[in-house]
Image (spheres, grey):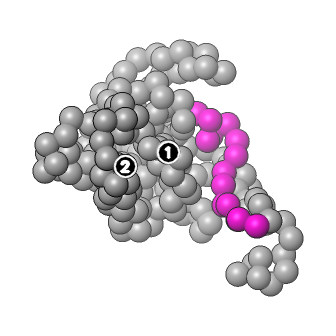
């Protein structure tokens, strides 16, 4: 609507959001041996279930990149419970993905990473618009995913602190994160 009304640059800074990245482990290899229609149908089913969870938890889907999924809570409308919303969504994603793989008799796994902090968000492009996020928070959320483990939700100490005692965790210990050095991280296990 803002673009339609002639606004040329849409950019906002948000001091407190929670970013989620999810990646389908083994999907590239899987897609090389399956009919293209089956690949797209499966991805559509997986990401549609993730979209449904995002909507249910008030989380904003940002984009899919191949077999990866990115979402955020706390923007465009700020909310104090952004970490809780993303944690609840991540647990739902884990369960929905497991159910789908069981029904389809497939051995794929999903790896999820979460981090909280400030971001810049805005619209880029002239022909095909894209709403995206930038900043160290985005990079660290991506690193939580890539440094995580299949079928687990890997979160930063910052997100762990925001979630308080409303959820259960397993301490992972220190992980050396590219560009950030050693970081204390956790696995999200469920609700308290």
In this orientation, does residue 18 appear?
yes
Magenta residue span: 127-140
Q: Position of residue 107 (x, y in %)?
A: 21, 35
Image-quadrant location for residue 79: bottom right
**For this rendering, which residue is in front, 177 or 81?**
177
Please, which residue is most extreme toward the bottom here?
5
Q: Earlier in the sequence, mark 1 or mark 2?
A: 2
Spot the residue most to the front.
35
Per the image, the residue denoted by label 1 is 66
Secondary element at tag 2: helix
Q: CA distance from mark 1 to mark 2?
A: 14 Å
Quadrant assignment for the N terminus: bottom right
Question: Does residue 146 lie above or below 67 as drawn?
Answer: above
Numbered disc total = 2
Q: Quadrant of residue 41?
A: bottom left
Q: Are marks 1 and 2 in contact (CB under 8 Å)?
A: no
Relative to 9, residue 166 above or below: above
Q: Nearer the viewer, mark 1 or mark 2?
A: 2
Q: Residue at image x 67%, y 37%?
A: 136
Q: Is residue 90 magenta?
A: no
**Where residue 142 sits in the image (x, y, percent)?**
54, 36
- Which residue is at 67% across, 61% downward? 130
Q: Is residue 146 left or right of residue 104?
A: right
Q: Residues within 10 Å of mark 2 (few under 14, many from 20)?
A: few
Q: Which mark is residue 52?
A: none
* Left or right: 26 in relation to 5: left
Q: Is residue 137 magenta?
A: yes
Nearest the viewer among 125 and 37 is 37
Q: Which residue is mark 2?
A: 36
């Amino acid at each position: 609507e803002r673009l339609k009304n002639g606004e040329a640059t849409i950019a906002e800074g948000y001091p407190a959001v929670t970013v989620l990245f999810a990646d389908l482990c083994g999907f590239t290899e899987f897609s090389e041996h399956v009919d293209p229609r089956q690949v797209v149908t499966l991805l559509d089913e997986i990401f549609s279930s993730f979209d449904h969870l995002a909507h249910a938890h008030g989380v904003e889907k940002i984009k899919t990149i191949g077999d990866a999924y990115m979402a955020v809570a706390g923007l465009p409308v700020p909310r104090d419970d952004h970490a809780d919303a993303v944690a609840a969504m991540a647990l739902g994603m884990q369960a929905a993905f497991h159910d789908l793989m069981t029904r389809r008799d497939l051995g794929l796994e999903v790896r999820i990473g979460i981090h909280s902090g400030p971001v810049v968000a805005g619209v880029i492009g002239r022909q095909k618009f894209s709403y995206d996020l930038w900043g160290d928070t985005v990079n660290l959320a991506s690193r939580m995913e890539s440094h995580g483990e299949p079928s687990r939700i890997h979160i930063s100490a910052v997100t762990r602190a925001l979630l308080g005692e409303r959820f259960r965790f397993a301490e992972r210990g220190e992980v050396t994160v590219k560009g950030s050095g050693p970081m204390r991280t956790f696995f999200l296990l469920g609700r308290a």
